Image: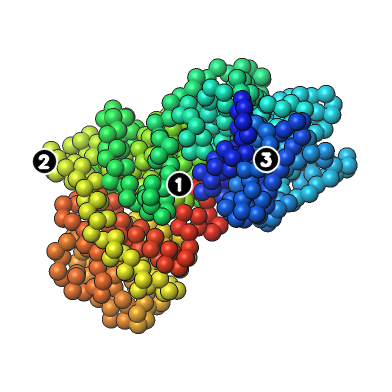
Amino acid sequence: MCGIIGAIQKKGEVAPFIHQALKRLEYRGYDSVGVTTIADNELYMKKDKGKIDQVHKKLDLDDLPGSTGIGHTRWATHGIPSMLNSHPHFDCSNEIAVVHNGVIDNFMELRRELKKKGHQFESETDTEVIPHMIEDYMKNGYSLEEAVKEVALIIEGTYAVVAMCTKEPGKIVVTRDGNPLVIGKKENAVYVSSDIPAFLPMTDNMVLLLDGEIAVLTVDDIEIEKLSDGERVDRDAIKISWTADQAQKSGYPHFMLKEIHEQPDAIRNTLRLRDEEIEKAAKMIDNAERVFLLAMGTSGHAALAGRHMFASLGGVLATSELASDFADTVYDTITKSDLVVAITQSGETTDTITAVKSARQQGAKVLAITNVVGSSITRIADHTLITQAGPEIGVAATKTFMVQLTSLAQIALKLGEISGKPGTDELEKKRESLHGLPDIVSRVIATEEEHARQIAGLFYDSPSMLFLGRGISMATAFEGALKLKEIAYNHAEGYSAGESKHGPIALVQDGFPVFFVAPRDDTRSRIIGNIMEMKARGASIISVIEEGDDELLELSDHSFAIPKGVEPEFTTMAYVVPLQLVSYYMATRKGYDPDKPRNLAKSVTVL
Ligand code: G6P
């Protein structure tokens, strides 16, 4: 949520890099953008409301002098998207520039005090208090670093802050608490950003900055210390395994489509996770008295599917909980015998991090499944599985969902091994099916993509749709509906097919689209009953079925065929693919950009 970047180069103008880095961060927010540089002891700034390309066309974001600069692409929290509310924000004398991601809870009070002292505010944002506070300290003889330290100790809430000042050109000071910041380093340049892809084309050397730390960046040095006691932190750079190419569209019109096509490889790579890692995760589950799967959004649907996999293969009852509601429901009952499994592609979702921290306080153990090395969740968890999707740029999660499911499936198989319940042959059959999924997903994309485009063309203007499934297919149906809402803005509801007759069926009339996720598993005969109920009321039935299931083919107005050989526990991974493609093609048919859906962001770092 909000993309921030800072960069210092030994020579050459930095603005074109900042502009490109912001483009790579645009999935974090895109209602306004701004760039500020320092040259000849002066700040140069350009910012406005709108997506980066629009603002660049108007202002030319590349045309700013100087080799030190910062930039920001915004997802509004305090103050509407407008030129004045865009970051960077400045002090009264335009000597200090700040970009910020997060929310400052005590900004009203700070703003009041600063106004009393005569500070002039231009925006409605919480962020603007920061440059004014820095200004006050610097007037009293503090260095930029000392001033940022003082400010960090006063502001409450969550933040990642990047600041620079004309009095100390060639230097950027950064600090964080609750919002991500990573530092990139190469000879003759240093970068800081809220996410790795921003500087990936320049360097794959990353230095982590942790909550409660402050770093002073110059082109030759990175100095990190703890805010609490000033203790110096020596931290080695780590190599990022992602490549810059992975963060390009590579000829696809959108990242989302590219990422859907990358799913077979993403599964393949995640299946290579070390057995010891999976075993450690499975043992944590096996040893726990109760297991809570915590997640939000698409990851929540992976949790729901994981619950089924754990029960069916491992005989383990886990509950899946929305992280945002965890504190208000089961929190009081959590003990040290419990385990929470946090599933989060970004590793930064505040709802999830907050729930996990609170469970930890009660003594629970934490297992994390995330796609981002060094993300916040990895530092809270006792054990982390890093899924191997590579960078996902499209805001609507696709391949990260797939790899979450893959690692949950691996854990479930290991639980089966530990419990010995499914039997060796049975487990082997399941394992083979899981390892066959990359090929199956490739075939689904190859055979069903054009079909998905046609279905999208038939139903894109339907104001409302239902997505129904039973058992694990509920997770698939929920995800299908979520994708459609997120990027095509059609109202869509994912529902238990069993529950659908207790309400949603009232919506159904002639031509009302109802998607059924109907693999050939134990739920099939009951799903047929639900299809009949919907048909009897005039619904248009669009089903995702197993290849050769003639009975369901006949009952459906339209259907997608999934190759045979997918075991019931893994159907979500194959059956969700046509639904992802339908959403993609509905969004593009309606002229929307599926990579940047309105009001959404890739990682949501507010509560
Ligand atoms: C946002 C994204 C979703 C994602 C959700 C949870 O809403 O737009 O795609 O599923 O956050 O994110 P996480 O990083 O925790 O998986």
Q: Is residue 403 left or right of residue 197?
A: left
Query: What kind of element bears circle 2?
Result: helix
Between marks 3 and 2 in the image, the one whose residue lies nearer the viewer: 3
* Foreground of the two, 77 or 395: 395
Number of marks in picture: 3
Between marks 1 and 3 in the image, the one whose residue lies nearer the viewer: 3
Q: Name the residue carrying label 2.
A: 425
Crowd tier of the residue under label 3, counting other residues whose Cα lies within 10 Å: few below 14, some 14–19, many 20 or above: many
* Residue 352 coordinates in the image, percent (x, y): 49, 43
The answer to whether 492 is drawn above or below residue 123 in the figure is below
Query: What kind of element bears circle 3?
Result: loop
Tell me the amino acid under the disc marked 2.
Answer: Asp
* Residue 533 coordinates in the image, percent (x, y): 28, 76
Rendered residue at 64%/37% (across/down): 70
Q: Name the residue carrying label 3.
A: 64
CA gap, disc 3 and disc 2: 66 Å
